[in-house]
Amino acid sequence: MRKAAGMSVTTKAFFSVMFKIMITEKEIYEALCHVHDPEIPVLNVMDLGMITGVGVTGDGIWVKMIPTFAACPAVDFIRKEIREELEKRLSVSVRVERDPSVRWNSNRLSERAHEKLRHFKIAPPEKLSPDAEGNHTWQMEMLTGVECPHCGSGNTYLRSPFGSTLCRALHYCKDCGHVFEHFKPME
């Protein structure tokens, strides 16, 4: 822990400010790797590309985040988890804000997230390509022929565009017979 026990409140406050200034962005990002998605627990907020910025202030640290889906019911839970995990690991006050200037899309998923999804038996999303205006869009065709995370076959079909959450679709593999979820490409 960064705070020493047995100090007066004034001394603790002084050392608290001194230690907060010494926290690096790297330490904040490393601590964020311990905050996992409640719906796909193998992924953390860094894997998901949910963090848009971090910083240190005189009275603590701040984190800017974006939800993976506009109507995601887990946003408040994740925000609370970020605050609690960073306060525990870094012993500082943490302010977590939703970043209105950035919209999440599935291209923000790290390559490591794609590997973790496959290992978790969820097909990762395809990369979105920018259109003429530079916007990332997806087509319904992106939900067909999705590679099966169980056997690697592309001989699959879409069973339902909606899975256990709004960001997933259900597919069936004609080769191995597994039904599997697919993290949909999202713009």
Image (cartoon, rainbow, N blue to C red):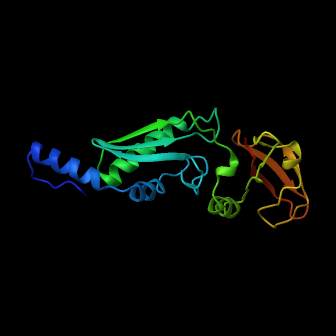
Left or right: residue 174 compared with residue 149: right
Percent position (x, y) of residue 134? 76, 42
Would you say 169 lies left or right of 91 here? right
Q: Is 47 in front, or is 39?
A: 47
Residue 67 location, quadrant: top right
Q: How many numbered badges does the structure rendering display?
A: 0
Give the answer, above or below, for where 66 lies relative to 116.
above
Where is residue 40? Give x, y as percent: 61, 51
- Residue 32 locus on image (x, y percent): 46, 53
Q: For this rendering, which residue is in front, 15 or 144?
A: 15
Q: Residue furthest bottom?
A: 151
Asked which quadrant contains residue 161, the reply is: top right
- Picture coordinates of residue 1, whole percent (x, y): 25, 58
Q: Residue 101, relative to residue 39: is it above or below?
A: above
- At 57% across and 35% down in the image, what residue appears? 101
Quarter of the rendering containing residue 93: top left
Q: Nearer the viewer, residue 113 or 38?
A: 113
User: Quarter of the image containing the C terminus?
Assistant: top right
Residue at image point 56% right, 33% down: 100
Q: Residue at x 71, y 60 (%)?
A: 121
Residue at image location 82% in from the left, 66% down from the top: 152
